[in-house]
Image (tube, rainbow, N blue to C red):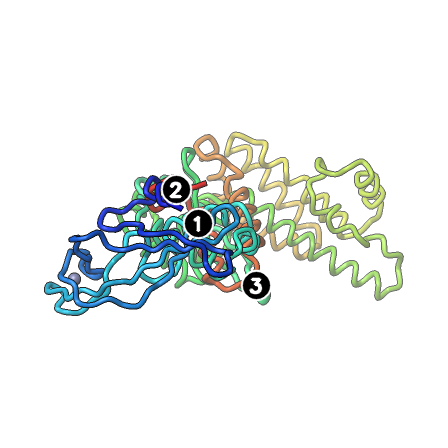
Amino acid sequence: MLQLITILNRCHRFPGFVYQQARFSSDHKSIEIAVRPRKGSKAVCSRCHQPAPGYDQLSERRFEFIPFWGFLVFLLYSMRRVDCRSCQAVVVEEVPWGDGKRTLTRAYMLFLARWARRLSWKETAEAFRTSWEKVFDAVEHVVTFGLEHRVLGQVDAIGVDEIQYAKGHKYLTLVYQIDIGITRLLWIGKERTIESFQGFFTAMGKDVISKIVFVCSDMWEPYLKLIRENCSEALHILDRFHIVANMNKALDQVRAEETGRMKREGRAPVLKKSRWLLLRHSENLGSDQRFRLRDLLRYNLKTVRAYLLKEAFQQLWEYSSPAWAGKFLDEWCRQTMRSRIEPMKKIARSLRNHRELILNYFRAQKLLSSGVVEGLNNKAKVTMRKSYGFRTYRVLELALYHSLGKLPEPESTHDFF
Ligand SMILES: [Zn+2]
């Protein structure tokens, strides 16, 4: 087992400590490596991070290291306590391989956290014969480090989005940086309220906020108000993704109401299973679906008329001039207001009210990569699905920062893979 200690000294060496001896556990399922302080080296106070005279020694602790060839690996070490003069207290020492709170070594936490970005947390725990809770600890450690050490720098553009994370209208507010060069998750707010969104501006600080040039969001009034107040200089854009999403919601509402009414009146269920047919962009339908859609469009139904209005609206995004886009928008709203389809009329009213913010989309078109908020929203949804297990706010917060935050990682003595 001398060789194992040689390897450890190569990849996981810390001045002040030596690997003493490696042995199998009694059941031969794990390897235990005894660690001791190097002779003459002083313990470091975990509170002030300065060397301090020794006080006593605690009983042996086990620190979980990266598994090796099918064996769990533990470092065994008896922590010293120091009598720290500057802290005027007896304090447990700081060890470079652990973070003081958790039983996993830093190296193993970074290792697990990297895998937890590719696999679900449950899969990660299973793959490395550890528990879901330890994967949680690992991600928490890495994300906490990342948030403390990230550099915000200049943020030109942000996108505000919300995402439902549990039944009963539980939403998170997500703020992304959507600069051409860098897209990342900047901030997560619990709930979708004025107070929670105000937390973003407070957390980022005036220095970062005042330099923002573009803000993309949906039409939710409290967002609009806070953005006006905090980023008065920025160009506020209602982006395509949110407008299309609202329109799909309206169409879905029309379809659901009409389906119910037809059922009550005993009419043929022509709208059955039409939901995805109508919500999806017609270009993305297969030939069977396209045939069904053509069939459906022959009926004189509110749903069909709402669908045609939605499809006609798509043309808006092809304009490059704000003036022509504005003319198209006005004409679409006029037609829709005459449609007698209430959910669509509501959309038209809202679009009219936010006309200038929508046209900002065309004013900023060449400066922003459109569709970026949509892409991040999809990624966030995938992340939420992968971190299943315990759907608490804290779990989601960590999982989202971990996969979308592009956070810096703790330094490592070796690139374990
Ligand atoms: Zn101290």
State which mark lies toward you, 1 or 2. Answer: 2
Q: Residues within 10 Å of mark 3 (few under 14, many from 20)?
A: few
The residue that disc 1 covers is: 66
Callout 3 amino acid: Ala
Disc marking residue 379: none
From where the camera sits, is residue 221 visible? no
Ligand 1: image quarter: bottom left
The residue that disc 2 covers is: 3
State which mark lies toward you, 3 or 2. Answer: 2
Helix, strand or loop for disc 3: strand
Residue occupying image coordinates x 80% and y 42%: 293
- Side (left or right) of 120 relative to 407: right
Residue furthest out toward the left: 85
Q: Whole-percent x and y of residue 359?
A: 49, 39
Q: Whole-percent x and y of residue 374?
A: 54, 44
Helix, strand or loop for disc 1: strand
Callout 1 amino acid: Ile
Residue 244, located in which quarter of the rendered image?
A: top right
- Side (left or right) of 15 relative to 2: left
How far apart are the alpha carbons under marks 1 and 2?
17 Å
Mark 1 or 2, nearer chain start: 2
Disc marking residue 166: 3
Residue furthest out toward the bottom: 89
